[in-house]
Image (tube, helix red, strand yellow):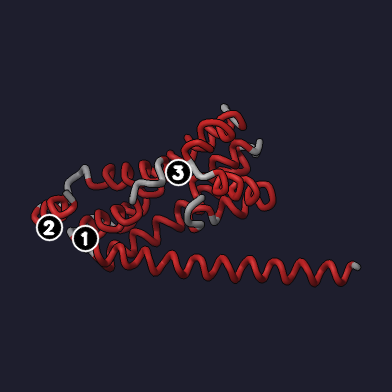
């Protein structure tokens, strides 16, 4: 299946539908995280950009798809609320991941949302939890948009570098996620050290 898609991409230049396709990939990947949309987006944006599709348009379509899906996730979290999270969601997603997302949003709402696309495993859940937490959409929209812009800029640029090479895209995402975890670990460690110092100073 994947090989057939890659062969088609190699033999056919992008048409007017390339942009909406990129937006749809970003939309589905955000709304249904198990879908390997990041890798697909890199491959398809690489194919499109290498064939003359503007890089900026690839970013815009990716951001639009991600942002729309994020708004839907926020709405789902806001309306059904805790019944949805504690019932259906915990049967479909590991409860530890749900609880971790809840904790992150409760402690650092807007900041976490701004970085949400860069937090592997719980990024879409974080937007859902933000809706469940009672956060107003007006406070969530800018961080969510910022996160989508940053993430799909990275993926679009990666696509322009690697083209429609599936192996290169997979390799990039594996190494990129490792670096994300390293940065997150350093950030958390720095935060904890700073907090401990403040407590000592106040104590």
- Residue with the mark numbered 3: 67
Q: Looking at the picture, tell me which residue is in the foreground, 146 or 194.
A: 194
Name the element at disc 2. Answer: helix
* C-alpha gap between disc 2 and disc 3: 29 Å
Q: Is residue 19 visible?
A: yes
Q: Is residue 64 visible?
A: no
> Pointer 1 and pointer 2: residues touching (CB < 8 Å)?
yes
Q: Looking at the picture, tell me which residue is in the foreground, 120 or 64.
A: 120
Q: Is residue 87 left or right of residue 158?
A: right
Of the image marks 3 and 1, the number of the one nearer the N terminus: 3
**Residue at (40, 49) in percent of width and height:** 63
Q: Examine the rendered structure and indicate whether residue 127 appears above or below residue 152.
A: above
> Pointer 3 and pointer 1: residues touching (CB < 8 Å)?
no
**Residue at (69, 51) in percent of width and height:** 107
> Dot 2: few (<14), some (14–19), or many (≥20) neighbours within 10 Å?
few
Image x and y of residue 53, in percent: 23, 55
Name the element at disc 3. Answer: helix
* C-alpha gap between disc 1 and disc 2: 8 Å
Q: Is residue 60 left or right of residue 20?
A: right
Image x and y of residue 95, in percent: 56, 43
Image x and y of residue 24, in percent: 32, 42
**Residue at (51, 66) in percent of width and height:** 181
Q: Examine the rendered structure and indicate whether residue 2 appears above or below residue 87.
A: below
Badge nearest the viewer, 3 or 1: 1
- Residue with the mark numbered 1: 164
Badge nearest the viewer, 2 or 3: 2
> Dot 1: few (<14), some (14–19), or many (≥20) neighbours within 10 Å?
many
> Dot 3: few (<14), some (14–19), or many (≥20) neighbours within 10 Å?
many
Image x and y of residue 143, in percent: 56, 50
Of the image marks 1 and 2, the number of the one nearer the N terminus: 2
- Residue with the mark numbered 2: 10
């Amino acid at each position: 299946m994947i090989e057939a898609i890659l062969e088609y991409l190699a033999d056919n230049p992008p048409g007017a539908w390339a942009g909406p396709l990129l937006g749809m990939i970003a939309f589905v990947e955000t709304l249904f995280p198990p879908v390997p949309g990041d890798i697909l987006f890199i491959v398809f944006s690489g194919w499109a950009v290498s064939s003359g599709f503007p890089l900026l348009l690839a970013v815009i379509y990716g951001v639009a798809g991600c942002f729309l899906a994020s708004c839907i996730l926020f709405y789902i979290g806001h309306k059904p609320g805790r019944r949805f999270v504690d019932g259906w969601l915990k049967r479909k997603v590991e409860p530890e991941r749900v609880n971790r997302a809840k904790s992150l949003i409760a402690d650092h709402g807007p900041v976490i949302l701004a970085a949400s696309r860069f937090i592997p495993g719980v990024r879409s859940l974080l937007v859902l939890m933000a809706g469940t937490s009672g956060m107003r959409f007006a406070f969530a929209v800018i961080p969510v948009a910022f996160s989508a812009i940053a993430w799909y800029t990275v993926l679009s640029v990666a696509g322009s570098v690697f083209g429609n090479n599936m192996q290169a895209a997979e390799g990039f995402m594996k190494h990129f996620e490792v670096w994300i975890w390293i940065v997150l670990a350093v950030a958390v460690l720095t935060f904890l050290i700073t907090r401990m110092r403040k407590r000592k100073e106040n104590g």
